Amino acid sequence: MPTTDPYAPDNIFAKMLRGEVPAHRVFEDDVALAFLDIMPQTPGHTLVIPKLAVRGIEDMPANAWGPYMTRVQTIAAAVKKGMEAEGLNLRQYDGAAGGQTVFHLHFHVLPRWGGEMLRRHGDRIEKQDVLKEQAARIRAAF
Ligand code: 5GP
């Protein structure tokens, strides 16, 4: 059942897709765009968004999941390799009550290292030069 709220084309991720706001991009094709989260929970925290204008999991057409999740898998592998991570978390916050703050569907790819704690979701903004260096490492890992 699709959510009742309409997709808002002025959300920050829609603006990124249109090139209206900058992002440290690591991947883009006709299906998905991936970029570093500005408030990372771990170093290399990457967001993968579909190019379709959908708010959440119920709004995504069934036949669009395969191509999108294939990109999530490819990007997750590059994040892990580029960041030399030991493991990964894949997260999706759906709806305001589920913790979603940007209403364009996205998966979080979180590199993990044994013993390292996750920062709180949306905790603090990372320095641009740190994000730039991490994005270069991830792009080089595809
Ligand atoms: P959600 O809470 O919807 O699951 O995730 C939204 C994510 O987008 C958060 O982790 C937040 O840090 C990130 N975010 C919000 N605004 C921006 C932005 O302007 N640029 C980037 N790169 N990430 C953003």
Image: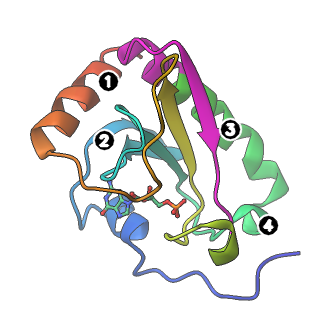
99 up-or-down from 136: above or below: below
Nearer-the-camera pick, 42 or 37 = 42
SS for tag 1? helix
- The residue labelled by disc 4 is 58
Three-letter residue code for mark 3: Met
Q: Tell me residue 84's x, y (percent).
A: 40, 11
**Earlier along the polypeptide chain: callout 3 or callout 1?**
3
Stretch of the chain drawn in magenta: 77-94
x 22%, y 47%: residue: 126
Three-letter residue code for mark 1: Arg
SS for tag 3? helix
Q: Which mark is residue 69?
A: 3
Mark 1 and mark 4: span between their CA atoms? Answer: 30 Å
x 42%, y 76%: residue: 11
Mark 3 and mark 1: span between their CA atoms? Answer: 18 Å
- The residue labelled by disc 1 is 139
Q: Are marks 4 and 3 in contact (CB under 8 Å)?
A: no
Mark 2 and mark 1: span between their CA atoms? Answer: 8 Å
The N terminus, quarter of image = bottom right
**Earlier along the polypeptide chain: callout 2 or callout 3?**
2
- The residue labelled by disc 2 is 25
